[in-house]
Amino acid sequence: MNIFALVIYFLAYVAVVVLGLRYYSHMLQLSSYQFQGYFRFLKSKPQRYGLHVGFFFTTIIACMTSEKTAQIFLAISFLFLVFLIIQYLPKKAKKKFVVTQRVLRLFVTYAVLYAVFMLLAMIFDYWVIAVFVGLLFLVPALANLINKPIEKKVNEWFIKDAQRILNEHPGLRIIGITGSYGKTSVKYYLHTLLSEGYRVLMTPESFNTPMGVVRTIRENLTPLDEIFICEMGARHVHDIKEITDIVHPDDGILTSIGPQHLETFGSIENITDTKYELFDAVQEKSAEGLKFANGDNEIIASNKRHNNVVYYGTSEGCDYRATDVEYSADGASFKVTTPEGETAEFSMKLLGEHNVTNVVGAIAMAHKLGVPMSKLKMAVRRIAPAPHRQELKRHGNVSIIDDAYNSNPMGAKMACNTLSKFKDHVRILVTPGMVELGEKEEEYNREFGAQAAEAADYIILVGSEHTRPIKEGALAAGFSEDRLFVKEALDEAIILMNEIDAGKQKVILLENDLPDNY
C-alpha cells in the first residue's frame, strides 16, 4: 500500500474514532453517566456493532497474511471504516450533546487510552489498533470508570461551594418537592403562588439531581431570595437523601409515590422509602417544619410514616380539600376548604383531574406560609402548565396536549383521562410507550393500551420495540385495528397524525418522547 493510501486509511480511522467516541459520549451523557443506563443502551440494538466486528477481523487478517492478500483485506477494512463514518456522522438529536467540563475530561482520558493502544501496537503488532475501534463502544464506559474518582472530587468541591452559599443565607427558607410524578408541575405552580408574597427561586426545568441543584444554587441564588423551591428527583435508593444532605430543607411536599424507574429501584417499597427521605430530612432539621403529602395517592395514604403531615387533594379526610370540582376542555373550577374551615372558589386553565390535586398542594403550602386566599385565587388563574406536562397548545382546528416528558403508569392513565374529555373532537394518541419499568414494563404498557382504547379514536405508536404490549392491550380491549398504526420514527407519526381527517376538530395527545439512547 502506497503512502497516499496509508494516509487516507489513517484519516478514515481517526474520523471513526472521533465521531464514534462523540456519539457514544452523547449516549453516556443521556444515561446520566450511569453504567446501568449506558449498558442497557448498548444491549438494545446489537446490530449496530456489526461494522466494528467486520473492521476488527479484516484488519487482523490483513496483519497476518501475505502482502498481496493483506492489501485486499485492508481495502475491505477501509470500506468498513467508510460505513462507520456514515453511521456516526452527527444527526439531529432530541437532546443535544453538551460539551461540558466533564465531557472534556472524558476526551482527555480517551486520548490517553488511544496513546496506550498505539504504544501496544508498536510493541506487539499493528493489529492491536483494530481492537480500539472494534471495542470503541466500550471505551466511554472504561474512561468513565477511570474518571470516577476525579468526578467525585470535582462534585465534592461544587457541593461544598453550594453549601457555603446556603450558609451565607441564614434566612432562606428551603422547600423540597419530590414524588414519582407531579413534582415538576407542583414546583411551577408553587413558584407562581408564593411569588405573591415572597421573592422565590426554583430549580429550573428538570434540574432535580444533586449536581443540578448545586448548579442552581451556585449560579442563580441571590441575597434577595427568600424562598428556594428545590425539586428532588430519584432513580436509585437514597437519591433523595443525597440531595437533602446538601440543602437541608425546612419544608417538604410529597406529590406521589408510584411505579416509576422500577428498573433501577427494584421495588415499590424501595421507591416509597426513598421518597420519604424528604420528610425524614425535614423532621431532622426542625419539628416545626411543614410536611405536605398528596392524600389522593393510594400508596401515600397507606404508608403514613410521619406525624404532623398536612394532606391535600380531593379525597375525604384531606386537610386541604377540593370539592365541587367541574372539568372542561379549557380547565377546571373547584372550592378549597382549609383545616380552619375557610372556603374559597378557584378556577384554572390547567387540564386534568390530577392537576386539581397538584394545585391544591401548592395552595396548601402557600397558605400555610402566609399568602391569603384572596391573593391565591388570582394567582391560580394565572398558573400556566409546566412545559411538556399536559401542556395544551392550540393551532387552528388542532389542539395538542403535550405530555411528552417522561411518562409513567399513573401519568399515562391521567393523560388518557384528559383526552377522553374532548368528546366532540377526533382524539388521537401518539406514544412510544413507557420505559424503565423493569420486569413490569410489558404489564404496565399493556394496561396503558387498554386505557388508550377507551380514550382515543386513533392510536399511533412510535417504534415497535416498546409499543407491542400497548398494541396488544388496545386490541384486547376491542380497539379497531384499522385505527391503530405503528411508525418507526416520530417524524412519520407526526405526518400521519396531521393527515387524519374525520371532519371534526382534532385533539392530539403526545404521551412521552423517548430520548436518543432508547
Image: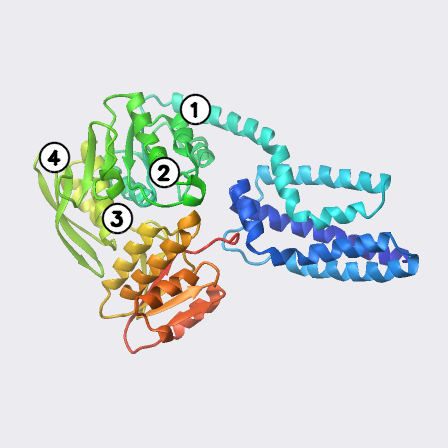
At 9% from the left and 33% from the top, the residue drawn is: 340
For the residues marked 2 and 1, what is the alpha-carbon distance in whole angstroms? 27 Å
For the residues marked 2 and 4, what is the alpha-carbon distance in whole angstroms? 29 Å
Residue matched to label 3: 383
Q: How many marks?
A: 4
N-terminal of the pair, mark 1 or mark 3, is 1
Residue 231 in view: no
N-terminal of the pair, mark 2 or mark 1, is 1
In the depicted view, which residue is nearer to us: 11 or 437?
Answer: 437
Query: Depth-wise, is mark 4 or mark 1 nearer the camera?
Result: 4
Rendering coords of residue 82 (x, y %):
73, 60
Rendering coords of residue 404 (x, y %):
39, 55
What amino acid is at disc 4? Pro
Whether 408 is drawn above or below 196: the answer is below
N-terminal of the pair, mark 2 or mark 4, is 2
**Residue 268, disc:** none
Query: Depth-wise, is mark 1 or mark 3 nearer the camera?
Result: 1
Secondary element type, mark 4: loop
What amino acid is at disc 3? Ile
What amino acid is at disc 2? Ile
N-terminal of the pair, mark 4 or mark 3, is 4
Residue matched to label 1: 163
**Residue 339, disc:** 4
N-terminal of the pair, mark 4 or mark 1, is 1
Residue matched to label 2: 271
